[in-house]
Amino acid sequence: MLTTPCPSCRRPKGRGKYLCGPCWFTLPQSARSALNLRDTHAHARLRELHSQLTGGVPLHEIQVTR
Ligand SMILES: [Zn+2]
């Protein structure tokens, strides 16, 4: 099965997942529930996540606008 690297730790993650399991569960609950919403803002939230990862924000401090 093809996998892509986790954008946080670079380990393989499942396809269609934003992060690998351990990284995902390090995110604050509020960020996880916002990222799980599949509406018209889903891509904007993903950009928020990635820009914070790129900016070096620790996983447990990442905030995603709902
Ligand atoms: Zn990871």
Image: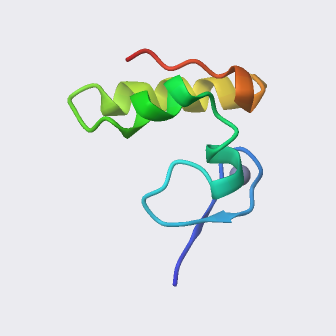
Q: In which quarter of the image is the C terminus?
A: top left
Name the foreground residue: 58 vs 56: 58
Quarter of the image for residue 16 reads: bottom left
**Residue farthest toward the left in the current orientation of the protein:** 40
The answer to whether 38 appears left or right of 52 in the picture is left
Q: Residue sitting at 38 percent across and 25 percent down?
A: 44
Horizontal and vertical percent position of residue 50: 58, 32
Question: x, y percentage for residue 1?
Answer: 52, 84
The colour scheme used here is rainbow
Residue with the most extreme bottom position: 1
Residue 35 in which image quadrant: top left
Q: Residue at x 50, y 34 (%)?
A: 32
Q: Residue at x 72, y 31 (%)?
A: 59
In the image, 24: left or right of 59? left
Q: Position of residue 15 (x, y in %)?
A: 47, 66
User: How many numbered discs?
Assistant: 0
Identified at 38% across, 39% down, the residue is 36
Task: Check the image and report above or below for 58 versus 18.
Answer: above
Tell me residue 22's x, y (percent): 71, 52
